[in-house]
Amino acid sequence: MSSSICWRCLANASPQPLRHASIKSRYPTSLPTLAFSTTPYFQFPLPPKKSTGVKVTPRKGTKSLVIKRSKKQAENRGRRPAPGERKAMRKRIVLSNVNALEVPAMKNIDKYNMFDRGGEGQVLGIPGPIVDQLRAVEAFKTTQSWGFFRSPGTLMRRETVDMGEMITDMSEDEEARKTVRRVLVGEKGSGKSIILLQAMTMAFLKGWTVINVPEAQDITIGHTPYQPLPSSSSPTSYIQPAYLSNLLRNLPIANPHLSTLQFSQPPPSDLPIPIPPDISLARLASLGASDPQLAHPIFTLLITDLLSPGRPPVFFSLDGLAHAMQPGTGYTAPNLKPIHPHELQILNWFFNFLSGRQRLPNGGIVMAATSQSNAPKVPALELALSELEGVTYTRAGQPIPKVEKNPFVRYDKRVLDTLSDKAIEVQRLRGLGKEEARGLMEYWAKSGMVRERVSDGFVGEKWAVSGGGVVGELERAVVRMRV
């Protein structure tokens, strides 16, 4: 088909401008035409990349613009605590408060009034030298509110006076000296650790030798170095040189009379160092404290000499009994099994005296206290104490608590054997009487810690709120609670 427009017409067309401008005339500033190339051409710069946080150093001879951003200055947090400083602050004991009122005419406890029945319900102060001795054996606890008052004082409750009578009789009459083995039990805040402290105070006043294990958990938790005892038979015993060294360091401070006692045993020949025959017991303890590797043999010699005839009675105590009766400790034997607490030598010594396997020839007291605020559950200990408590209450004419043995629970035989002797006494601490609670509240009021008037109604109200005079709850309701 032929086209409607012939080539002749196109050739004869007049060169007049078109009605619509060309693209080139409409966009006079268009991009220039470039030759074909495989290299890309960028007329405009690329968008800036995100900063990666890595600072690139400019090349030598080139200038770069560095814009410093305003940063928040680092806070000055002070120096970091030194090793052991946190533990020292956590275990710091404050025994005096200069802001507290001084109680007028408050008597101190001494060896003459510690067994006086007329002093029941009164608060007696602890003399300064005895406070230093108690601090050396770590008798004070961080949970006790000693820092609220001007000077340390203790309530003479009925159990305290009974303890004073027993210590006095054993001190004055050599024929009445015996080995008293006792376990303190009771609910939380009933004053078990305070009874231990009061017993140690009376033992110091009478010139006894006091050895105290302040917390069994510190021995079994696995924080002290340990090593097997080479001379031990099966099961293997383990010693803790650092702990024994610290115990020997505090022993002469707590017992000043050791400087007047000379070592009476023939010095053994297998000791690493020679021992003079006329050395004092205080100097002997210092030798063991100077070198942890000497602590165990020196402590063994010291215990042996203290049990020889003519020595003063011994008061051996331990707090936190449940930690020393649990099936395992934080230490591991060579067979990768946990070590039993009774395989630790210092606990083995204590349990030998508590069970009666070893006597105190010069008389003395072996006392342990349980804890309800921080204690693992040990079924064997609960069963053994309940059976002993039934025997104790039967002797006192009180009803026997019901004892049930669970056939589906495995009981630790070592715990049952240790507490199998019926001569072990179990003393359960209960709440204070109203007269004892009144005496304690009056002491708090004289110290400026109670703003209300100590009347019969106030005493009865706080005594009921505290669960029948539980010391810890009574202190919480009267001293610590503010409305």
Image: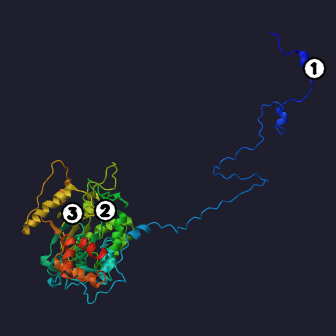
Viewport quadrant of the C terminus: bottom left
Element carrying mark 1:
loop
Q: Is residue 406 above or below residue 169?
A: above
Marks 2, 1: nearer the viewer: 1
Q: Earlier in the sequence, mark 1 or mark 3?
A: 1
Judging by the rendered image, the residue that carries numbered circle 2 is 217
As drawn, which residue projects farthest toward the left? 397
As drawn, which residue projects farthest toward the top? 1
Q: Which mark is residue 12?
A: 1
Q: Quadrant of residue 480?
A: bottom left
Judging by the rendered image, the residue that carries numbered circle 3 is 352
Q: Quadrant of residue 12?
A: top right
Q: Give, as a three-letter code, the residue at label 2.
A: Gln
Q: Give, as a three-letter code, the residue at label 3.
A: Asn
- The image shows residue 302 at horizontal and vertical percentages of 28, 71
431 on left or right of 218: left
